[in-house]
Image (spheres, rainbow, N blue to C red):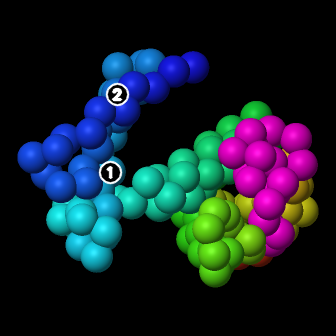
Amino acid sequence: MECTINWLPQSGMAFSAETGSGHLLMMDGAPDGGGRDLAPRPMETVLAGTGGCTAYDVVLILQRGRHDVRGCQVAVTCERAATDPKVFTKIHMHFVVSGPALTEAAVERAVRMSHEKYCSASIMLAKTAEITTSFEIKT
């Protein structure tokens, strides 16, 4: 896996990232740090990537278990250290999973398996942050 980051000096503190798979991602800083608030902050992209990683796992685990999953939303909130480096110290992920006949046991298992075995991003962030999860099922 690889990624190339380019600073866009004409935009203040904006950066473009080109991923190894050929996709572009824009990032920008806050105005008080020289940015123009035109794109997510780099740490927001870390948080979003982690949410995407675990959502992917949960959907795949449920599908492989032959569950009719129709939606999966993850609301991710975090706290950061007050001083540099301002690492994530607490992360909470609330899953809203929808589908007919989904059981609490199946969703709980999928979330647990993601965080204990499959989600590289959340397992990596767990080295500095306390990660908690919750979920609800909508039919």
Q: Residue at x 45, y 26 (%)?
A: 3
Kindly identify the amino acid type of the residue bearing the numbered disc 1. Answer: Met
Q: Is residue 73 left or right of residue 64?
A: left
Q: In the rendering, at what x and y percent does residue 108 appear?
A: 85, 62
Name the residue carrying label 1: 27
How packed mark 2 is, by other alpha carbons closer than 10 Å (few <14, some 14-19, many 20 or more), is: some
> Counting residues from the N terminus, which is met first, the one under dot 1 or under dot 2?
2
Q: Residue at x 62, y 68 (%)?
A: 84
SS at mark 2? Answer: strand
Kindly identify the amino acid type of the residue bearing the numbered disc 2. Answer: Glu
Q: Is residue 86 left or right of residue 29?
A: right
Residue 86: image quadrant is bottom right
Specify whether residue 135 is in view. Answer: no
Q: Is residue 129 magenta?
A: yes
Q: Nearer the viewer, residue 11 or 71?
A: 11
Quarter of the picture containing the C terminus is bottom right
- The boundaries of the magenta stretch are 116-132
Name the residue carrying label 2: 18
